[in-house]
Each structure stands twice: as C-alpha cells, then as structure tokens.
Image (cartoon, rainbow, N blue to C red):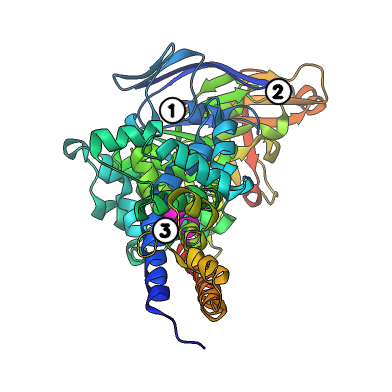
C-alpha cells in the first residue's frame, strides 16, 4: 500500500470531524422528524416527507447549490446568521457539516422512522395509564425501544457523511485543510498528473471506512434488538 | 363511587349506556363485540366521548366534550396482554407508575403488593423471560403500585391457560379485599364474574341489557344453558376418605369434588340450571347426594318444551332449575310448593369457588 501524504491524512481527519459533528447534529433532528412522520397527524405531512427525501433524488450539485443560495453570505438565511450571530457556513468546514447533515438526513430519518413505527402503540398507551405524559412516554418508552433504529441510522448517516462529495464541493468548495474531505481529495488527486496512487489509496480508505460503518451498524442494531428481547 | 355515562360512535358500532358501581368489583359482562373493552378504553381516557360523563369518586374525568388525558386520570389498567415494558426489569416496570404519582397519593406500598402477588423472586428479570401468568401478575402489581383511584381489568385472564387462571383469580380476589380499590372487571366468563363481582352489568350491542347482583343477573338469562345460580355458603369439614368437601348452606350441604379449602371460608357455588333436577319427596336410592330444600317462587318459559323453575331455597338464596314443561305439569310444579332440588356433584366445579 502506498504511503499516504500529510495532505491525505488531513483530509481523512477532516472527514471524520465533519462526519462526527454531522451525526451528532443530524440524529436528534432526524429523531424529531421521524417521530413527527411516524406518529404525527398534520396537513402537509407528505410534503415534509418529500422535502426530507429530496436530497436523495436530486443531483447532489443541486442540493449544494441550493445551500449556497440560502446559506451563502449573500443568501437570505446566510446573511441573517452572519449579521446577527456572526455564523458563517460558506467555504468553512461547518458548511461541510451542514451539507453532510442535509444529505444524510433521508437515510437517518428513514431508519429511525421505521423503528418508531415498530414500537407497539399499546405499550405507549399502557405508559399513559400509569401516569406518564407524552414527553415522558417518548423518553421512557418510545425512544429506548427505537434505539436499534437510531443506532443503525446514526452509523449509516455517519458513513454517508464520510463519503459526501457533490453537495459539499458545491457549497463549501475544496479548500485544503478547511473543506477538503476524503472525497474531494480523491477528486483532486484524480485530476492531477501522478495523482493516481494517492487517489487509489484514499479510495481504498473510503471503501474500508464505509464497510466498517455498515457492518458496525448491523451489529449495533442486532445487539440492541437482543437487549430488548 | 363510579358513574359512567357514555355515548360514543366507533365506526359501525356505537356505545350508549350508563351504569354505576360501588366499592368492590363491578363486572362488565357480555359476548365479544358487546362493547366491554370500548367502555374500558373510554373510562381510561384512551378514547374520547361524543357525549356523556365519567365520574370516579368525586372527580369528573370527562364531561360533555371535556376530556382528561389518560395520564392525568390516575386510573390503573390491566390489559388482556400484560403490556410490560420490554426494555425494563420487572422492578422498573413495577415502579414505573410511582414516578408519576405525587408523594401524598402513594397509598399502596411496594412490599405487600409484591408479597401478595408472589413476584419477589422475579424483580431483576426481564419481562420476556417470564411466563404468561408471571407477566400478568407483574402487570397487576404495576397497575396497583401507581395507587390508582380505580382499577380497570380488561379480561386479564383471557390469554392464560386454565391452571394460570386458577392461580391468578384468587390473587385478584385478595387485591380487591386488601387494597380497597374499586375495580371494573371485564369478562365473558360467568365463573370469574360470579366469584369476584358485587355487581354485574350485562352489555349487549353497546347497551346495558341487565344489571344487578351476580345471583340475580345470571339466574334470569333467557337461554337455559346460560342460566346460572349463585348459592352462598361456608366450607364444611371435608370427607377425606372420598375426597369431597361440603359447602354448608341453610338449605343443605352442597358436595364438591376434591378438597376445596379451609373450613369456614365463605364461598359461592355456581350451579347451572341444566344440572338441577326437582323431586317432590326427599329422594332415596339415588346417586345424587346434594339435596337442597326450597319453595317454588315461580315458573317461567311459556309454551316451549323447557321451563325454568325458580326456587327460593331455605335461607333466601335462589336456585333455578331447567326442567321440561311436561315434568312441570305432571308434578304440578306451581308457586308455593315445597320441593327438593337435586344437584349432581360431578357437574359442579371443584375448583375453589
């Protein structure tokens, strides 16, 4: 295996940082959305469902471009955040996190939603008759019983965030040390003469990491299911 | 103590009923689809009333559109399936309701409940590792330990086999007496209802068909196979040689197969009208040993081949006998006549009654 350059290591480290932060933010958001979709009854539910899943079917470039238009320094949300709170996403690693969250959300929401839907409503009713209100029932019954799905969703989301490319490069570009993730680094290497070895090595790293995440997701889910029965 | 007045449309079905209940067990009795479980759900607050009122003690839980959500009703429910929380230990399941019970309202202590139900050795186990009977005992304890104002039981024994039922029914009886919580008990088993209930409300198609004491309600069924009399007595000294136990009643002993329990314990014996024969004289040379004396109070059944003879037993209990109309005519079974009722001991339930 060819030696990895310091630049390649920096891309791997950045990818991990982005994916980890994206998972930490994405899972609670996805859990709330999944609960809304699984148990909520409100107008526009199908639309919300569609919106969450949109990044799955759009060309990633389009998602990245939409983020740039909305969250860029001149975009309506981006300008507001910049002026009011000094928060800037465009061309920062935090922007890569946002892109990763948006791209991973459909997968995470789907996994969590399925496991919330699998929770027996009769157990939630029983919890209610014992005096637990909706919030208490969610945290004491629904959430622990959906844990296998949440863990599976988190690992899948992490893997997705690790490999995100299209939306990231469109939204935050490909700045070494700031926004050059594994995927961007592979792209750069593949476009550079003599970059083949580096591209190949990083591709192998990406494949191994992805595989590890998938296997971990399956094992975690199985273990959590085992703990429940 | 409880006053339930429900009007509710549920798809093709509608409930339109009112009943009241006092201390002890009020049984909702009726065939599947008569609305028993729907009444339980409405009282628990799991469904909303279209109109009506539900009052427990002096607290109004629902009143024409106002609806207290289930978690603020403090009404315990024991469902047909135990519904234990699979991710929690038995101990945590038992303590679940306590978390939400204000300190001042915690009337029921953990120790006595665990002892009564015999679940002390299960506390660290997960629900999935328990048998059906054990799960249901934990479910009973869990509902009780939330110190509810009222306990609802929706066919709690229906999912269990006969042996488990025999084991848990006396526990429910003990809970009823020891912890003094009013209970609404749903069942379609006459034996359970006759044994537990102070009052029976018979539901048919979402309405109250009849209500009253178990003795009154079951004696006045229309189908002769459903007519059941409840005779009260106390266990007498058993005949150890033949393994028989008498239930002493003012009208005479009723012999049960087997050794039923401690002498002096008050019991209720269920007698199906089709298991009773009548004789004008005290019989002789007959295999039947349970002979009760009484007076005919009435004969009903019209022109059909079978009539029901209603006996007032000595001591005041009533006993229904199903006989053919020809027998009634030929023996001149008319109100006021003294007769002997013959009950086949083999037909009686030797399970502790």
Disc 1 packing (10 Å; few <14; some 14–19; many ≥20)? many
Q: Which residue is mark 3?
A: B87
Magenta range: A144-151
Is the residue at mark 1 from the same chain as the one at mark 2? yes
Local SS, label 3: loop
Q: Is residue B131 above or below residue B336?
A: below
Q: CA distance from mark 1 to mark 2?
A: 52 Å
Name the quadrant containing residue A174. Answer: bottom left
- Residue at horizontal 62%, vertical 45%? A58
User: Which corner quadrant holds the N terminus of chain B?
Assistant: top left
Furthest residue to the left?
B104
Q: Which residue is mark 2?
A: B333
Q: Which mark is residue B227?
A: none
Coordinates of residue B96 in the picture (x, y in percent): 32, 48
- Camera-near label (1 vs 3) is 3
Q: Is residue B43 visible?
A: yes
Coordinates of residue A214 in the picture (x, y in percent): 54, 68
Q: Which residue is mark 1?
A: B45
Q: Is residue B52 left or right of residue A107?
A: left
């Amino acid at each position: 295996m060819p030696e990895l350059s310091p630049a390649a290591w920096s891309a791997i480290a950045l990818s991990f940082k982005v994916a980890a932060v994206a998972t930490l933010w994405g899972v609670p958001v996805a859990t709330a959305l999944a609960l809304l979709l699984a148990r909520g009854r409100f107008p526009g539910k199908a639309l919300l469902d569609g919106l969450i899943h949109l990044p799955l079917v759009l060309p990633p470039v389009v998602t990245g471009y939409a983020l740039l238009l909305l969250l860029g320094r001149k975009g309506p949300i981006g300008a507001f955040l910049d002026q009011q709170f000094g928060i800037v996403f465009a061309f920062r690693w935090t922007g890569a996190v946002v892109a990763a969250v948006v791209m991973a959300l459909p997968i995470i929401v789907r996994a969590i939603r399925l496991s919330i839907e699998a929770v027996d409503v009769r157990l939630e009713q029983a919890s209610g008759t014992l005096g637990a209100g909706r919030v208490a029932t969610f945290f004491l019954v629904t959430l622990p019983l959906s844990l296998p799905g949440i863990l599976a969703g988190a690992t899948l989301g992490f893997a997705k965030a690790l490999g995100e490319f299209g939306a990231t490069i469109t939204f935050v570009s490909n700045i070494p040390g700031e926004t050059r993730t594994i995927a961007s680094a592979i792209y750069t290497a593949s476009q550079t003469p003599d970059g083949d070895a580096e591209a190949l090595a990083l591709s192998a790293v990406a494949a191994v990491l992805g595989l590890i995440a998938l296997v971990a997701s399956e094992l975690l889910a199985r273990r959590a299911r085992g703990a429940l029965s | 103590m409880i006053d339930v007045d429900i009007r509710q449309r549920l798809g093709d079905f509608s409930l339109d009923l009112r009943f009241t209940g006092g201390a002890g067990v009020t049984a909702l009795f009726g065939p599947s689809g008569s609305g028993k479980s729907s009444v339980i759900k409405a009282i628990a607050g799991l469904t909303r009333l279209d109109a009506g009122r539900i009052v427990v003690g002096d607290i109004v839980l629902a009143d024409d559109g106002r609806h207290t959500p289930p978690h603020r009703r403090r009404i315990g429910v024991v469902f047909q399936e135990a519904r234990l929380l699979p991710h929690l230990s038995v101990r945590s399941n038992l303590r679940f309701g306590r978390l939400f019970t204000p300190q001042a309202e915690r009337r029921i202590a953990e120790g006595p409940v665990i002892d009564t139900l015999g679940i002390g050795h299960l506390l660290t186990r997960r629900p999935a590792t328990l048998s059906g009977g054990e799960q249901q005992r934990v479910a009973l304890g869990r509902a009780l330990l939330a110190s509810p104002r009222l306990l609802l039981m929706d066919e709690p024994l229906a999912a269990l086999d006969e042996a488990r039922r025999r084991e848990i029914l006396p526990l429910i009886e003990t809970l009823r007496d020891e912890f003094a919580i009013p209970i609404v008990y749903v069942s379609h088993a006459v034996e359970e209802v006759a044994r537990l209930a102070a009052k029976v409300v018979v539901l048919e198609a979402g309405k109250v068909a009849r209500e009253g004491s178990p003795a009154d309600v079951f004696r006045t069924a229309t189908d002769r196979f459903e007519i059941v009399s409840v005779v009260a007595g106390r266990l007498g000294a058993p005949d150890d040689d033949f393994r028989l136990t008498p239930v002493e009643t003012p009208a005479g002993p009723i012999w049960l197969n087997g050794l039923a329990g401690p002498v002096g314990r008050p019991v209720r014996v269920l007698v199906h009208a089709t298991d009773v024969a009548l004789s004008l004289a005290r019989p002789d040379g007959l295999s039947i040993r349970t002979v009760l004396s009484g007076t005919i109070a009435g004969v009903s059944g019209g022109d059909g081949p079978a009539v029901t003879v209603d006996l007032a037993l000595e001591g005041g209990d009533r006993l229904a006998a199903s006989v053919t109309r020809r027998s009634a005519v030929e023996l001149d079974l008319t109100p006021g006549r003294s007769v002997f009722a013959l009950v086949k001991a083999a037909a009686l339930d030797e399970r502790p009654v």
